[in-house]
Image (spheres, rainbow, N blue to C red):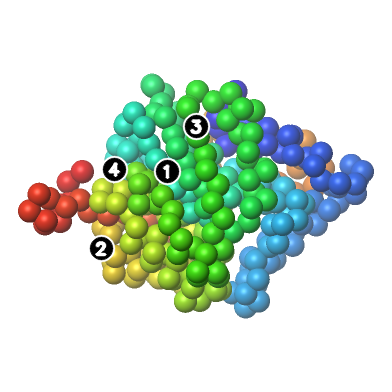
Amino acid sequence: MSLKCFSVVKKVLEDTYSEIPDDEGNRDRMIALAIEQISETYLNMSKTGAGPDFRDPVNRFAYVYAYVPVHAHWVSELISWSQDAKDVFEKDKVRIACIGGGPGSDLVGILKYLDERGGRPPSIFCEIADGCELWKHTWSDLAFSLDLPVRLSTDYIIQRVGDTDAWRHPVQFEKSDILSMSFFVSEIAHLGEPAWDYVGAVFEKMKPGAVLLFNDNQNAMYYGKVDEIARSKGLEVLLEGKGDRRVYDRNEKSDELSEFSKKFGRKSKLTGDVSWRVMRKPLMGADGAVSADP
């Protein structure tokens, strides 16, 4: 099947729809309400300090439907804008770390990019770090259900940002060739210092030459802090921007989700006011000097 974002999300939604208890009518009403409430929660999160409860399968389903297609598209788009990011995927084997990647946007975007690039895809090992273990159930059968042309292995790691002792345990981020943070910082910013400590720890662990993909809301509270921490950890900015982004891709068919939009009376998100970055940890030369050349 096509690895376009809406196609992949449609398959995932079809596979997980029946996991929500209750009859179809009540199920659809619960999902429609969850889509609305998640949007309101994000609008008020800086004040309330509370994000959506993704332990609830209704909220997880609603989030995948409403946000994952567009967020995944923007991850794919960001890779295509950066030659340094594209070069990573020219290797035979690529290690990826999706930080806060439980909802699946990062991985779906990467698969879309590889599908559209064509040619022989690399083998992918993807480490997904998230605070909600239950996201694993949503995406656990991804490789099997989509019959991917990519050799894909995934490892799911629970890291609750507010629990500093837990996430200081060893992880494999330092082995990753490319790392992603897709609408993750805005999810954790309300935690204050633990959030920024976590971001700093991730940047610190990045190996020389590793590339970071960052997408988030256009709010200086998020991208400004990330820029500050990145500078302190020696990351170089390869690409940056902010502004209105849409799904500009005639091959992406949002109407693939029309059966769900009719059920819920709401369409998936297609636009956003976004900030983005591609960064890299500089390489070290034989003399110990920092080198910008890959």
> Gap in Å between the C-alphas at discs 4 and 1?
15 Å
First of labels 4, 1 by sequence position: 4
Where is residue 60 shown, x and y percent of the image? 70, 51
Q: Looking at the image, can residue 39 be seen?
A: yes
- Relative to the observer, which residue lies in front, 260 or 64? 64
Q: Which residue is mark 2?
A: 234
Q: Residue at x 31, y 48 (%)?
A: 210
Label 2 Cα crowd, 10 Å radius (few <14 / some 14-19 / many 20+):
some
Could you tell me which secondary element the residue under label 1 belongs to?
strand
Q: Which residue is mark 1?
A: 96
For the N terminus, give its image quadrant: top right
Q: Looking at the image, can residue 262 be seen?
A: no
- Relative to the observer, which residue lies in front, 149 or 109? 149
Q: Which residue is mark 3?
A: 152
Could you tell me which secondary element the residue under label 4 belongs to?
helix
Circle on res. 84:
4
Q: Residue at x 50, y 35 (%)?
A: 153
Q: Please count the marks in the image.
A: 4
